[in-house]
Image (tube, rainbow, N blue to C red):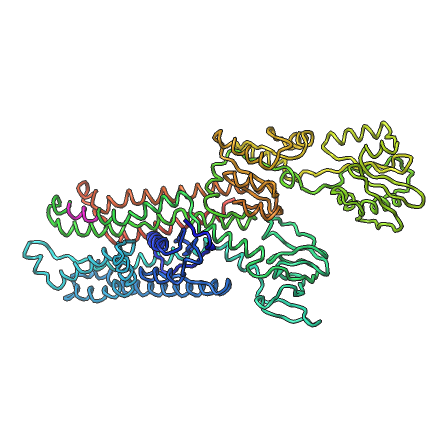
């Protein structure tokens, strides 16, 4: 149980030295034993550890000591940019080292294979020569396998390095013994065979497989690299009335920053001067540029189009929306889906089982093997160790999740963890809030009808604009927005608000009213029958009607509505086609809810719902066996979002809604929900494909390696072929996951 006084921190750290899925499990296990650690999750694919710990109880330097003791290491950030740069340098160095080791191993292995296959009996001291040139391949280029296996053994643990070290080590030592002391076996009537080429080829193929795997894995994190590359390195700031170029790290809150056409926005801020259009597709997924003018908010990484802007820096570094997105994606990619936890358990016991099968293979050959029983048994046991690798199994889930979550980020679908992506696959009921989700969440004038064409419409429009500007009613903003496009207010107007009814104003000895039908009745303003019919019709369509009059007659009527988003009708139809039951919950009245439901094709809706009732409604759906996703955008939705199996927030909603939600749609477009569900399905299907082939590979490969076919047709699998197959199984899983990148 956590200490109440402790601050719980959840952070992601790069881990170095991971060579297989079992390595991830080993490092994860040792991290979980450290003081103050609540939970730890190590991802082999992106070589990172997501650690949740109590700050007051934990010395993070102990993480480093613990990991180093079993052959791994951890990188602690000084600041965000430093750790990224350090990890990038480390990865490049490791890739270069691996590339050089693989190339040199090939150089030494090639003559070993050629001599063994074609010229073995033509060399007087052929075996001795093979032993000398094989030794560097096994014990120098492949030394990391032996070092890591030894470190694991000291902690009574095993991993893939253990299999490689034992198999190649036994093959080399057995061959060396037969080279130096051939008479020992010859006395028993057994030919002293050597298998130097098998030891060399296995090491070389595994190194090649690791090289291909590392290159493929680096592509799975492409989305993060793209996001990180969105922030410019230098900016132009105005200080002491002078423009100067500074590094992004030197920018301070309140600085005025010049943004020219084509430049990226370096910080989150506010437009102070200028007007332009920004490409915000990296946040919203929308290709259409967004207009920015004085008072508009701008976000890091978005791209300025044609105009010039001067912005004030408000959020820097890790505070920016881009940094939060990067952090969320990284944590999501480091998290584990339930299926991965199951696979980890299998991978954790896989190596000991394989070692047991290898020993059993040797025993069976010794008992039932007939002629050359020991040699055949030893080679079969070695081949079992070589061909059985937990890497393909360990890579199956995280590679698909990394690509899927990364692809979601590129499309404006921000996924917080792997669990929500997996759950989304099973969703069969979707609950939608109305305001801001199905509708725009911003009332606007949808109808403006003048009562008489002979009226001075320009003057009266300016008068109404002035009246509504002084009003504090929420709907007044819609009228002001509608009228202020081409008009200016007028001066000299006295104003009075009438609670629950509207407003009145006096101008040049005339009195004017703007409000509901009660206001009209109070002042004996008669609504002509024709306009009453128009009003009734508009109200049936869930519009709010405002009457504008002078002291004698009706001048105009306006209809205000929270309009449907353009994409809502199609999005809901698409969801229903997928077999998902769509429900709408709203605090609005029954008439409005019914109208919106009819327009969008929603069959199930509930009006006048309180926030607590939304959560209760979702709980009732869950009790009936539904897997429920909830979509909302406001504080009033937060309880329902927390209750849902999968919670989805609209990106333009409140911070608390996005904090509670597992998935955030950055563009607030309902059609993106369909995209998110498709992405979930594609990712889970890819995981299943990967796991199927990883299991099939081992189920078929291990019995053949043990010599199952020998009694039928005399076939024995060569350790060299087994090494190549093992290497390619991991690569094929990663490549299959990468297909997600290009799927629609």
Picture coordinates of residue 440, whole percent (x, y): 67, 41
Task: Indicate yes or no whether the magenta region holds residue 388.
Answer: no
Residue sitting at the far left? 187
Residue name at image x 41 percent, y 64 percent: 90
Picture coordinates of residue 607, whole percent (x, y): 64, 31
Does 410 appear above or below 119? above
Residue sitting at the far front? 5
- 41 or 439: nearer the viewer: 41
For the record, the magenta segment spans: 357-363
**Can I make out residue 63 in this image?**
yes
Does 153 appear above or below 286? below
Q: Which is the main secondary structure of the residues drawn in magenta? A: helix
Does 125 appear above or below 482? below
Name the quadrant containing residue 452: top right
Picture coordinates of residue 642, whole percent (x, y): 53, 41
- 505 or 591: nearer the viewer: 505
Name the quadrant containing residue 30: bottom left
Task: Indicate yes or no whether the magenta region holds residue 359.
Answer: yes
- 543 or 355: nearer the viewer: 543
**Can I make out residue 9 in this image?**
no
Picture coordinates of residue 720, whole percent (x, y): 26, 54
* Side of 495 relative to 363 (left or right): right
Residue name at image x 80 percent, y 45 percent: 468
* Side of 354 relative to 10 (left or right): left
* Side of 609 relative to 25 (left or right): right
Residue name at image x 61 percent, y 30 percent: 605
């Amino acid at each position: 149980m956590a200490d109440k006084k402790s601050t719980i921190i959840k952070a992601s750290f790069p881990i170095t030295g991971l060579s297989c899925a079992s390595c991830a499990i080993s490092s994860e296990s040792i991290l979980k034993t450290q003081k103050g650690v609540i939970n730890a999750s190590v991802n082999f694919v992106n070589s990172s550890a997501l650690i949740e710990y109590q700050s007051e109880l934990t010395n993070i330097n102990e993480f480093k000591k613990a990991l180093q003791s079993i052959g791994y290491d951890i990188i602690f950030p000084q600041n965000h940019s430093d750790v990224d740069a350090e990890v990038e340098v480390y990865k490049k160095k490791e890739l270069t080292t691996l590339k050089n080791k693989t190339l040199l191993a090939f150089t030494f292995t090639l003559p070993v294979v050629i001599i063994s296959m074609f010229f073995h009996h033509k060399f007087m001291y052929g075996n001795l020569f093979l032993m000398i040139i094989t030794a560097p391949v096994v014990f120098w280029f492949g030394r990391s396998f032996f070092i890591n296996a030894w470190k694991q053994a000291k902690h009574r643990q095993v991993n893939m390095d253990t299999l490689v070290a034992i198999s190649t080590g036994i093959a080399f030592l057995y061959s060396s013994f037969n080279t130096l002391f051939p008479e020992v076996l010859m006395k028993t009537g057994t030919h002293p065979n050597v298998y130097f080429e098998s030891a060399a080829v296995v090491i070389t193929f595994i190194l090649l497989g690791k090289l291909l795997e590392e290159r493929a894995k680096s592509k799975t994190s492409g989305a993060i690299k793209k996001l990180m590359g969105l922030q410019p390195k230098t900016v132009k700031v105005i200080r002491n009335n002078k423009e100067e170029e500074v590094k992004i790290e030197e920018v301070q809150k309140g600085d005025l920053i010049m943004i020219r056409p084509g430049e990226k926005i370096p910080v989150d801020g506010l437009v102070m001067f200028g007007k332009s259009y920004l490409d915000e597709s990296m946040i919203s997924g929308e290709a259409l540029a967004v207009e920015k003018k004085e008072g508009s908010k701008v976000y890091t990484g978005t791209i300025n189009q044609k105009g010039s802007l001067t912005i004030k820096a408000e959020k820097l570094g890790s505070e920016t929306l881009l940094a939060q997105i990067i952090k969320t994606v990284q944590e999501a990619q480091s998290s584990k889906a339930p299926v991965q936890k199951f696979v980890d358990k299998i991978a954790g016991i896989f190596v000991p089982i394989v070692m047991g099968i290898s020993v059993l293979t040797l025993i069976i050959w010794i008992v039932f093997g007939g002629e050359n029983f020991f040699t055949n048994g030893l080679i079969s046991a070695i081949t079992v160790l070589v061909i059985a690798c937990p890497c393909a199994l360990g890579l199956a889930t995280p590679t698909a999740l990394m690509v899927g979550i990364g692809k979601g980020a590129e499309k404006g679908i921000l996924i917080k963890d792997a669990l929500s992506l997996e759950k989304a696959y099973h969703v069969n009921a979707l609950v939608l809030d109305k305001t801001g989700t199905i509708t725009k969440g911003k009332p606007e004038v949808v109808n403006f009808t003048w009562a008489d064409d002979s009226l001075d419409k320009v003057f009266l429009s300016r008068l109404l604009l002035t009246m509504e500007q002084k009003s504090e009613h929420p709907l007044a903003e819609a009228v002001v927005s509608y009228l202020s496009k081409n008009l200016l207010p007028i001066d000299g107007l006295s104003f009075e608000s009438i609670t629950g009814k509207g407003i009145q104003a006096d101008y040049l000895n005339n009195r004017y009213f703007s409000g509901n039908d009660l206001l009209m009745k109070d002042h004996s303003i008669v609504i002509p029958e024709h306009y009453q019919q128009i009003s009734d019709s508009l109200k049936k369509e869930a519009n709010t009607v405002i009457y504008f009059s002078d002291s004698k007659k009706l001048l105009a009527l306006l209809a205000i509505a929270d309009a449907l988003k353009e994409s809502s009708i199609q999005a809901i139809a698409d969801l229903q086609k997928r077999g998902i039951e769509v429900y709408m919950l709203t605090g609005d009245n029954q008439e409005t809810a019914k109208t919106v439901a009819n327009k969008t094709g929603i069959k199930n809706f509930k009006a006048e719902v309180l926030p607590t009732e939304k959560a209760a409604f979702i709980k009732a759906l869950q009790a009936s066996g539904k897997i429920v996703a909830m979509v909302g955008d406001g504080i009033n939705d937060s309880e329902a979002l927390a209750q849902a199996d999968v919670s989805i927030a609209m990106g333009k909603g409140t911070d608390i809604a996005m904090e509670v939600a597992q998935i955030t749609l950055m563009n607030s477009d309902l059609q993106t929900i369909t995209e998110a569900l498709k992405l979930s399905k594609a990712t889970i299907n890819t995981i299943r494909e990967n796991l199927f082939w990883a299991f099939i590979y081992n189920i078929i490969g291990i019995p053949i390696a043990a010599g199952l076919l020998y009694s039928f047709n005399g076939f024995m699998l060569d350790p060299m072929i087994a090494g190549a197959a093992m290497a390619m199984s991991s690569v094929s899983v990663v490549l299959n996951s990468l297909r997600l990148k290009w799927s629609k």
